């Protein structure tokens, strides 16, 4: 069995967190269990080797060492959760009977890396007092459009009728019931075998729009779209079904495991819908990704929502499509009274990036975000994108967050 035993945040775990805290950070109290409840997380991305492994083809020992270093960094920054991408492109970072090993490990899709990254991550995260949220991408198959580059046994090659090329990538078609069932089964295999604290999805449902291209689901719409006023309503229903069914299956399979989603930060602009936010975003999840993120919260289909509010908190102007200070209260209002916890996704990757505007060159920008969000009791924590920046901390923005807001340890909300 690959299953790991359930653990709680004990006094010993809190002491371990304190013991691993860097001397330069404000010291936690050794041996004292943290009493504060908030999520302090980081995304650990594996797609295209964004955060980990640093490159494909490292030895198992080198991969393991890099992974442990990321977990230790999370502890040093007084975080309490790692959101680990374990199914980046219809593949797996565990021995899955449904999908091949991810090529980002060895450089060859389907090749066994010589160890079990997900099993190790769960075990080692829990040893450090960290939650491990397993991050899955439901429909993305590949970051190219050549099915022959997939291993011969890949489900996308065995079922070419499931596949839609779009925008230079391959996707499973969400409009097919057999696809929705398969991707759920593939993701739930990880939950069956490991003591994962949460199943986590990111912002990709129907793909982001690409100018001049059409997502070709004509046949599926002709077969299953009857009774809907238009294709957009049918597509939203497909994603609604996926979310509702997955939530039920997660809770049935493992009591205590949560189901959370991290959508793009704008549901709809107020100019489109009076219930929307006072934003001017070019992408609206309801209309472009066919993801009714607001509806999922209001209906209680998920345990937490973590919108990616990757904009600054500076006043809106004509060049800024959205603003952190506008979206935090909007999402707080959405979550209020639902029982769905609200976490905020933070754009740490922008801090110090010379391609970003002046406000992102200020090490205090993200700390101000947390100060602003603290005014809204619905906000139960923050997640930082992503692990590489949490460690490198280009201009000290993460250190400023820790110094200003994470002076002692905290337990994730439950």
Image (cartoon, grey):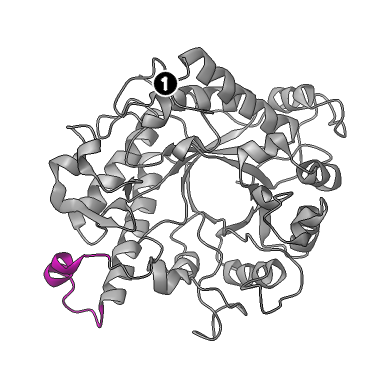
Residue 50 position (above or below residue 373): above
Judged from the image, the secondary structure of the residue bearing numbered disc 1 is: loop
Look at mark 1 in the image and give the residue it sits on: 116
Q: What is the quadrant of residue 164 in the picture? A: bottom left
Q: Would you call the spot at circle 1 few (<14 residues within 10 Å), some (14-19), or many (20 or more)?
A: some
Q: What is the quadrant of residue 16 in the picture? A: top right
Residue 317 position (above or below residue 73): below
* Residue 128 visible here: no
- Residue nearest the observer in this picture, 22 or 323: 323
Which residue range is magenta in the image?
215-230
Residue 219 part of the magenta segment: yes
Q: What is the quadrant of residue 227 in the picture? A: bottom left
Q: How many marks?
A: 1
What x and y, as percent, mark residue 35?
A: 76, 40
* Residue 325 visible here: yes
- Residue nearest the observer in this picture, 164 or 40: 164
Residue 212 part of the magenta segment: no
* Residue at left offset 45%, top offset 26%: 56
* Residue at left offset 13%, top offset 66%: 219
Q: Quick check: 136 left or right of 303?
A: left
């Amino acid at each position: 069995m690959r299953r790991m035993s359930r653990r709680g945040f004990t006094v010993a775990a809190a002491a371990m967190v304190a013991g691993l805290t860097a001397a330069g950070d404000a010291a936690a109290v050794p041996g004292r269990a943290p009493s504060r409840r908030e999520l302090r997380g980081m995304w650990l991305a594996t797609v295209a080797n964004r955060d980990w492994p640093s490159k494909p083809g490292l030895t198992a020992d080198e991969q393991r060492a890099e992974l442990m270093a990321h977990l230790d960094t999370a502890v040093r920054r007084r975080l309490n959760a790692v959101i680990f991408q374990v199914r980046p492109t219809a593949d797996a970072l565990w021995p899955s009977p449904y999908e091949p090993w991810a090529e980002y490990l060895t450089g060859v899709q389907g090749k066994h890396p010589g160890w079990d990254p997900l099993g190790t991550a769960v075990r080692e995260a829990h040893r450090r007092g960290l939650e491990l949220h397993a991050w899955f991408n439901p429909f993305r198959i590949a970051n190219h459009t050549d099915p022959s580059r997939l291993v011969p046994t890949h489900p996308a090659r065995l079922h070419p009728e499931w596949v839609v090329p779009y925008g230079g990538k391959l996707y499973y078609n969400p409009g097919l019931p057999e696809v929705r069932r398969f991707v759920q089964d593939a993701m739930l295999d990880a939950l069956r075998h490991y003591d994962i604290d949460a199943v986590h999805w990111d912002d990709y449902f129907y793909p982001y729009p690409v100018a001049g291209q059409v997502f070709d689901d004509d046949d599926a719409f002709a077969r299953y779209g009857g009774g809907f006023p238009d294709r957009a309503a049918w597509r939203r229903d497909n994603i609604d079904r996926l979310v509702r069914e997955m939530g039920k299956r997660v809770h049935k399979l493992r009591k205590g495991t949560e189901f959370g989603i991290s959508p793009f930060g704008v549901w709809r602009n107020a100019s489109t819908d009076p219930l929307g936010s006072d934003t001017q975003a070019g992408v609206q999840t309801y209309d472009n990704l066919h993801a009714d993120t607001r509806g999922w919260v209001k209906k209680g289909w998920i345990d937490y929502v973590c919108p990616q509010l990757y904009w600054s908190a500076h006043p809106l102007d004509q060049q800024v499509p959205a603003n952190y200070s506008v979206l935090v209260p909007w999402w707080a209002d959405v979550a209020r009274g639902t029982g769905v916890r609200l976490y905020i996704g933070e754009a740490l990757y922008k801090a110090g990036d010379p391609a970003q505007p002046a406000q992102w060159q200020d090490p205090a920008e993200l700390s101000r975000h947390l100060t602003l969000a603290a005014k809204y009791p619905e906000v139960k924590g923050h997640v930082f994108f992503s692990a590489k920046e949490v460690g490198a901390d280009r201009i000290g923005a993460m250190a400023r967050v820790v110094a200003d807001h994470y002076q002692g340890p905290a337990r994730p909300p439950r």
